[in-house]
Amino acid sequence: MALIVQKYGGTSVGTIEKIENVAEKVIAARDAGHDVVVVVSAMSGETNRLIELANQITETPEPREYDVLVSTGEQVTIALLSMALNKRGYPARSYTGSQVHILTDNSHTRARILDIDESRMREDLDQGRVVVVAGFQGRDEQGNITTLGRGGSDTTAVALAAALKADECQIYTDVDGVYTTDPRVVSDARRLDSITFEEMLEMASLGSKVLQIRSVEFAGKYNVRLRVLSSFEEGPGTLITFEDDEMEQPVISGIAFNRDEAKLTILGVPDQPGTAYAILGAIGDANIEIDMIIQNVAADSTTDFTFTVHRNDYDRAMAILEETASTLNAREVSGDKAIVKISLVGVGMRSHAGVASKMFKALADEGINIRMISTSEIKVSVVVEEKYLELGVRALHSAFKLAEAAVV
Ligand code: ADP
Ligand code: ASP
Ligand code: MG
């Protein structure tokens, strides 16, 4: 007998029929003799609908009130799923994040989990009940409701699995595992039987939304066995694993992309100590995260900077940059929201040269101009015009032969 934490995402609980289907899947695990804790998301589209309601009142709702609002979606699905289980003669109890003591810090809208008291869940499990917990939410020290950032139910599931020392954390979604790239963009993308934590972390942070990045961090840190599976089809899914030295690693495991970036440029700033700090420090002080940064080689003792931020932060970042530009006497400021970042990820890159040049050639062959480049040990990222996203990802998927299983 094992203890399993299962998480069902929004599309898996999007209708009453789908919630009944989830109940059947939970029951199958119970009938196999397992203890089950289930984490559910809000019905698909519900969180967006709630955010939209808030935005009809104000574009800048107080983060505390935003969290009270958007956390309600999950309260609906926990109750419905528990009813579906109880109706079938399988006792279940639903809990909000706060009720099972998911304690977080107080950074509303993107809170981090600090502690979980698993005793209440343990009591229910001992009584033979299924425990159904609302994903995406917790409470801070003062008892305020907090949320964990978009996609945060994945993190709730992994954190509960860690706290309960579960045998496995299963993330059920609308695809049957982690693929070489988003199967909605590349039709011959291939499901991976396994992927290392390190690669999954890069894929998630570079834009693959199949798992929230914090859930992968958490699972790696607390050694949680994590698997991604389909809610609608049987299959082994994808296991996230620790790197196995014995195993021959493919050079590239996957391609991630991010449509949420925007780039800003400041031209003709003095090439002297303190300039980078003046430009980027002001952005950082406004709590805007910067992703890629490029500084050009100086000419005539002036230089140019380009950097990217989340698209939602673009307007704010631009306003700050314009102020800095007038202080520094810069020549010009420009920006572009219609860009995307495409990244190749693979631990095998460490021991193989030539990945970047092969990438650039594949893009050049399609006439795709590269605007920015950044590399690290296990990834190469490029920024290109948004209209080339699909073409670029498909070209790279085929240039690196990702549809074919790696020959070991
Ligand atoms: P859920 O609502 O279940 O949390 P998400 O929409 O958050 O589901 O995540 C699943 C989606 O992630 C898939 O429908 C797929 O389009 C997308 N996705 C992006 N990259 C990948 C990838 N490499 N492998 C699988 N799915 C991916
Ligand atoms: N419902 C939340 C969202 O849409 C959390 C989740 O689905 O993981 O972001
Ligand atoms: Mg998700």
Image (cartoon, rainbow, N blue to C red):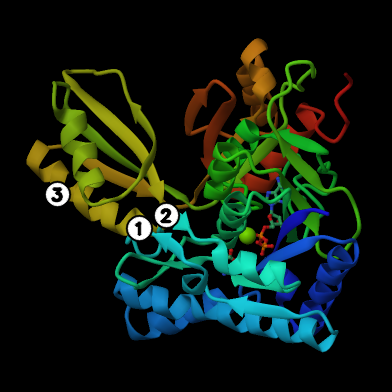
Q: Are marks 2 and 1 in contact (CB under 8 Å)?
A: yes
Mark earlier in primary sequence (1, 3): 1
- The answer to whether 393 appears left or right of 160 in the picture is right
Q: Are marks 2 and 3 in contact (CB under 8 Å)?
A: no
Q: Position of residue 364 (x, y in %)?
A: 64, 27
Other-residue count near label 2 (Cα within 10 Å), few / some / many at <14 / 14–19 / ≥20: many
Judged from the image, the secondary structure of the residue bearing numbered disc 2 is loop
In whole angstroms, how far apart are the C-alphas of marks 1 and 3? 33 Å
In whole angstroms, how far apart are the C-alphas of marks 2 and 3? 33 Å
Question: Residue type at mark 2?
Answer: Arg
- The answer to whether 136 appears left or right of 158 in the picture is left
Question: Residue type at mark 1?
Answer: Asp
Q: Is mark 1 within 8 Å of ligand 2?
A: no
Mark earlier in primary sequence (2, 1): 1
Determine whether 74 is above or below 235 in the image. below
Instruction: Tell me where residue 369 sits by quadrant.
Output: top right
The residue to which callout 3 is attached is 323
The residue to which callout 1 is attached is 105
The residue to which callout 2 is attached is 112
- The answer to whether 335 appears left or right of 407 in the picture is left
Q: Does the residue labelled 2 lie within 8 Å of ligand 2?
A: no
